[in-house]
Image (cartoon, grey):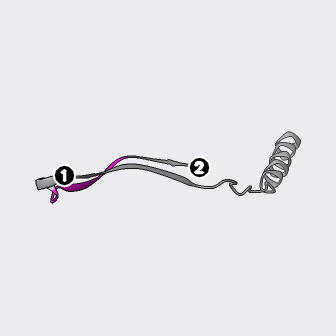
Amino acid sequence: MKFIMAGLLSCVGITAQAQDTKVEEPKGKATVQMFGNFHTGFGSENDNCRFELERTYFGF
């Protein structure tokens, strides 16, 4: 009986210490890089213009 009580008391002490942990806020900043192209026609194809988004990178 004494061993069971000693085991329970030691578990209560361990869980009380685990709740005192400090939460650390993330440090840094978010980054976004976008690469694209703009195309337009010459001469009789002036109405042919477009924008293409080639790739995008997200980081932290």
* Residue 55 is inside the magenta segment: no
Q: Which residues are magenta?
A: 46-54
Pick whichever, 60 or 52, lies toward us. Answer: 52
What is the secondary structure assignment of the residue under circle 2?
loop
Q: Which mark is residue 19?
A: none
| Disc 2 residue type (three-letter) | Phe
Instruction: Give the crowd class for mark 1: few <14, some 14-19, many >=20 residues within 10 Å.
Output: few
What residue would you read off at disc 2?
60
Residue 5 lies, with reference to residue 16, above or below; the image says above
Which quarter of the rendering shows the N terminus? top right
Q: Is residue 3 left or right of residue 41?
A: right
Counting from the top left corner in percent of width and height, residue 4 is at: 82, 43
Q: Measuring 17% from the left and 58% from the top, which residue is drawn there? A: 46
Pick whichever, 25 or 48, lies toward us. Answer: 48
Q: Is residue 16 left or right of residue 41?
A: right
Residue that extends furthest to the left in the rendered view of this protein: 44
Q: Is residue 2 left or right of residue 37?
A: right
Pick whichever, 19 or 51, lies toward us. Answer: 51
What residue would you read off at disc 1?
42
Counting from the top left corner in percent of width and height, residue 22 is at: 78, 56
Counting from the top left corner in percent of width and height, residue 9 is at: 85, 49
Counting from the top left corner in percent of width and height, residue 47 is at: 15, 60
Give the mark nearer the N terminus: 2 vs 1: 1
